[in-house]
Amino acid sequence: MWVSNVTVADGVVRMNVTFRNSSPATHASPEDLQLVDANKHSSPAIQDVAGCTHWSRTEFNNGAKLGPLTICFRPASTTLPLTVRWGPDMGFICCEADLKIK
């Protein structure tokens, strides 16, 4: 997962996100992404704001790329630092990755 062009305006955090797969099979889903604010509160991705990509779970594999997508969040606070948490549902194998973005 690559994140770029992070902006904060009117309480909405926007960013471009690109996924690239290096395994035989995987997916990306908006439900797998959260924004964690400085107070450790997490907020789900939103799709109800103009300019935010409306997307759903997407399957891709063997080096395929998804994006860039404009992903948006409406956190309780935009106080720094902000972290994107990606927790893809992978059945019995589960992982979580945090990426400090700002």
Image (cartoon, rainbow, N blue to C red):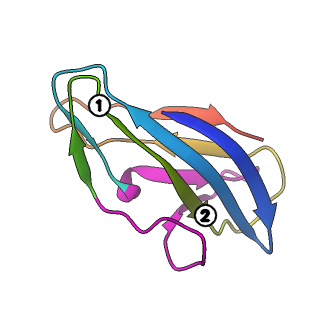
Residue lying at 49% horizontally and 72% vertically, measured from the top left = 47
Give the answer, above or below, for where 84 lies relative to 14.
above
Q: What amino acid is found at the position of numbered circle 1 in the picture? A: Ala
Decide which of 26, 40 is in the foreground and name it: 26
Residue indicated by mark 2:
73
Which mark is first along the chain, 1 or 2? 1
Asked if residue 79 lies left or right of residue 39, the reply is right
Q: Circles 2 and 1: CB distance less than 8 Å?
A: no
Give the answer, above or below, for where 51 lies relative to 71.
below
Decide which of 31, 21 is in the foreground and name it: 21
Q: Secondary structure at mark 2?
A: strand
Estimate the x, y position of residue 78 in percent, counting from the top left. Answer: 79, 60
- Crowding near the residue tagged with mark 2, few <14, some 14–19, many ≥20 C-alpha atoms within 10 Å: many
Give the answer, above or below, for where 98 lies relative to 8.
above
Decide which of 87, 20 is in the foreground and name it: 20
- Crowding near the residue tagged with mark 1, few <14, some 14–19, many ≥20 C-alpha atoms within 10 Å: some
Stretch in magenta: 30-56
Q: What amino acid is found at the position of numbered circle 2 in the picture? A: Phe
Asked if residue 27 lies left or right of residue 47, the reply is left
Q: CA distance from mark 2 to mark 1?
A: 25 Å
Q: Is residue 84 magenta?
A: no
Q: Is residue 52 magenta?
A: yes
Estimate the x, y position of residue 39 in percent, counting from the top left. Answer: 74, 53
Estimate the x, y position of residue 91 in percent, counting from the top left. Answer: 16, 38
Numbered mark located on residue 64 in the image: 1
Q: Nearer the viewer, mark 2 or mark 1?
A: 1
Estimate the x, y position of residue 43 in percent, counting from the top left. Answer: 56, 62
